[in-house]
Amino acid sequence: MYAEVLGPSLQTYITVTNSDTELIGIAFSLRELGMFFGSLVGAFVADRFVQWRHLAMSCTLILGAVTIGSVPWCTTVTALSATFFLSGCAHGAMTANGNTLLNSIWLKQSGGPFNFMHSGYGVGAALAPGFLAPFTFELVKTGINGTVSTKKIVRLGIPYAIIAGLCCICAGLFWFFNLCKSRARVAHPMELSKKENGEEESDARSDDDNDVVTPSRCQKLAAHKNILVYIVLPTFFLYAALVGNERVFSKYLFVFANEGPAHISKEDCFLLTSVYWIVFALARIVTVPVSLFIPLPCVFAIQLIGAWAMALGLYLAPPTWTMYLSFTVCFGLFKSPLFPTGLGVISTATTVTGLIAFFVNLGSSVGASMLQAVAGMVLNRMGRQTFPLFVMVSGLVLVFIGAALIATTHFYRIRHGSKSLSAN
């Protein structure tokens, strides 16, 4: 809910700040830029201060509560952009810590748990449109020439304050976990990977003189280079395309349905968005048992092709409520599990450390920032009807990048086995 109340609130932001889709798209992009900085700090904390991950989660949730509670008081694009930036910082740091925390528990069996954890995102997002609906009202404006216009916008104060309160409750839970956790030493991500591969503890000796290039040090540098080429770079590009495509769909679906060729009523648009997020959550839950019987790379490939096919169908379908609903549901069914399944595919080749989580968030923030800004500009200048074409083209790019990640992780496992890249 924290992240996905933004889409149904888009028209309210435009009205309150007296701006347009293009400017709010830039504000959304700044939120993704904040995710980059937040994930940078979060990755550092996750790898260097493993024992403080619960505390870091608590702090990021408090920052998230403050920022989401401040949004209703932003009456200019500048203030809204600054608040979104800080909100993105909290979001990025939270995901960097959360993903590494989960992977440290489940290791190579993280595929199902990743999907189950990320299904919570879909549950909150599904509740968001319906949660805002009771707070909508009609705003009547009279123009200079006497024309009267009516817009339905949302009173943001109460719902955003409730979401801030929920963030504080979650922060309290993680604070409690931090106080109650065992004092036993928590293994570093590099050590977890070594245990997976049956390596001896004695192999972890460090060189006393960093200027001396020893065979052991050369092997470490070569291993890091291999992970950079086979894992990190494909991961960055995958999540740039994946999250960018996802953010564009979720943020602009409401506007496209309401102001596009179909001119669907706002009530039905709220319903359409809610149904999308309900399917989004259920698809991730369903993927958990599926991933136990079907190899994750195969599941990932099916999801990639299915999401693109549904985007193509939305582009070619006639502009009717039935068609929009059908293809939106099917798109959410295939698109939703891509993010956690991608993490599961990566975890089959290497431990998802804080540094890898950072590149996941870096790609996510860069891709979402760029695509949301471009989509806002395109929809504002070329019309709302370009929305499905934009989603379909970006989805096709995602298919090729996803296929590349499947191939690189497969070759890495064959040639190098499972290694770990930490922030040493």
Image (cartoon, helix red, strand yellow):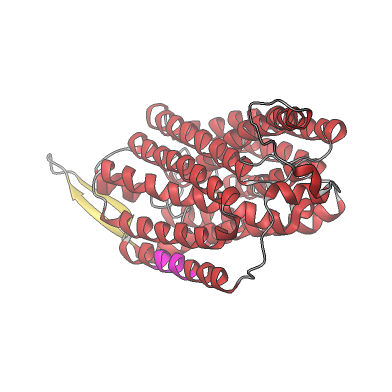
- The image quadrant that residue 402 belongs to is top right
Badge count: 0
On screen, residue 195 above or below 400: below
Q: Residue at x 57, y 49 (%)?
A: 48
In the image, residue 164 lies in the stretch drawn in magenta: yes
The image position of residue 308, as x and y in percent, is 67, 35
Residue 384 in the image: state x and y as whole percent.
44, 35
Q: Position of residue 78 (x, y in %)?
A: 27, 41
Q: Which residues are magenta?
A: 162-169
Report whether 130 appears left or right of 183.
Answer: left
In the image, 409 versus 155, the foreground residue is 409
Quarter-wise, where is residue 133 in the image?
Answer: bottom left
Q: Quick check: is 107 in the magenta stretch? A: no
Q: Position of residue 362 (x, y in %)?
A: 54, 37
Q: Nearer the viewer, residue 296 or 333?
A: 296
Q: Nearer the viewer, residue 24 or 188?
A: 188
User: Residue 283, can we see it?
Assistant: no
